[in-house]
Image (spheres, rainbow, N blue to C red):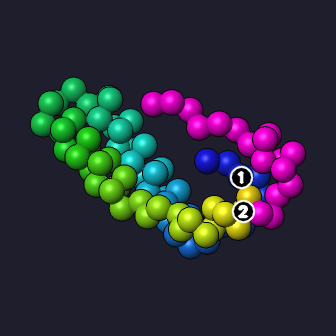
Amino acid sequence: MDWGNAPMNNNQYKNDEYRANAAECERMARFTRNESEKRTWQDMAEAWLRMIKPAPQSAIADHFDAIGPQEAHQLPSRPEH
């Protein structure tokens, strides 16, 4: 989620760190040939992702209140997984 120059709180920084750690674990799982180690890396990635805290709804609403209606239409859409 890229909101341009929206200020980030500590949870957002932590969430980004957790996502980066999960991505690294997923990368390691892809390159590991040992099935037991692959599963361990995948489990670690899932654990990092479970640590992510959702943004409070008020923070999301505050962001959209702070940007103009034209800018809101220009926000990138979320990619489908």
Image position, residue 29 (x, y; %): 29, 35
- The answer to whether residue 6 of the structure is visible from this angle is no
Image position, residue 71 (x, y; %): 84, 47
Residues in magenta?
65-81
Name the residue type under label 1: Trp
In this rendering, is residue 8 above or below 74? below
The disc, 2 or 1, on the residue closer to the chain's N-terminal end is 1
- Which of the pair 41/15 is nearer the observer? 15
Q: Which residue has dot 2 on it?
A: 63
Q: Which residue has dot 1 on it?
A: 3
Left or right? Give the position of 57 relative to 44: right
How many residues crowd mark 2 within 10 Å: few (<14), some (14–19), many (20+)? some
Q: In the displayed orientation, state which residue is furthest to the bottom.
A: 10
Would residue 76 be counted in the magenta stretch?
Answer: yes
**Tag 2 near tag 1, CB within 8 Å:** yes
Left or right? Give the position of 71 relative to 34: right
